[in-house]
Amino acid sequence: MMTAEQIVASHKANVETLFGLTAKAFEGVEKLVELNLTAAKAALDESANNTQAALSVKDAQELVAMQANLFQPLAEKAAAYSRHLYDIASGTGGEFTKAFEAQAAAAQKQFATLVDSAAQNAPAGSEQAVAMMKGAVTAANTAFESVQKAVKQATDMAESNLAAVSAAAPKAGKKK
């Protein structure tokens, strides 16, 4: 059984974690808003400049050349925006992952302590049931660790794919 002090400490830690994660979520939203405002301002400025340039075109050949020159910066800017967006999302998600892993580790430790305590206080003749329960806990922990590793591998692969796409986007814009 948990004591009143342990329960209060657990609730206090949970509330602190909640407020910490809420602050991190707001930081992520602030970064996203800042990124979008910067991108919108740059797009507006660029649109004004392109409109001025289009109005000063003297012939169709110059217009075609101007349009061709617009594709390269557009691809590079889209790739940069995607990288920034991913950095914000992965940074914020990383904070949530750390908090979740810490909470999960604490819960596993608490549960293991509870199982050990129950095993020590189990009546005679229940050794097989205790062994089965410990085996189930070990299997659950192993499964949880496997899932964590799979998620980490998928995240690494997604990061690698994003890097490849980001590197390829400006090159694709140059071909047009």
Image: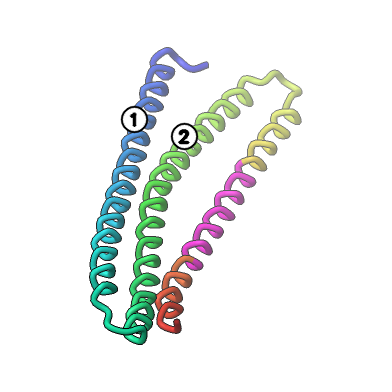
Task: Report the front residue among 106 and 95.
Answer: 95
User: Residue at 36% across / 83% down in the picture?
Assistant: 60
Q: Which residue is mark 1?
A: 19
Q: Tell me if residue 117 comes above or below residue 56 in the rendering.
A: above
- Looking at the rendering, the stretch of residues picked out in magenta corresponds to 141-161
Q: Amino acid at mark 1?
A: Phe
- Is residue 25 depicted above or below 122 in this figure? below
Which numbered marker is on residue 10? none
| Residue corresponding to mark 2 | 106
Q: How many marks?
A: 2
* Marks 1,2: beta carbons within 8 A: no
Which picture quadrant has residue 173?
Answer: bottom left
The quarter of the image holding the C terminus is bottom left
Going from N to C along the chain, the mark reached first, 1 or 2, is 1
**For mark 1, does the 10 Å Cα neighbourhood hold few (<14), some (14 to 19), or many (20 or more) residues?**
few
122 on left or right of 49? right
Helix, strand or loop at label 2? It is helix
> Measured from the top left, where is residue 47 in percent x and y?
29, 64
Residue count near mark 2 (Cα–Cα under 10 Å), binned few <14, some 14–19, many ≥20: few
Where does residue 32 sit, x and y in percent of width and height? 33, 48
Lateral position of residue 132 relative to residue 107, left or right: right
Side of 127 where 102 appears, left or right: left
Secondary structure under the numbered disc 1 in the rendered image: helix
Q: Amino acid at mark 2?
A: Ala
User: Residue drawn 39% across and 67% down?
Assistant: 79
Is residue 160 on the magenta stretch?
Answer: yes
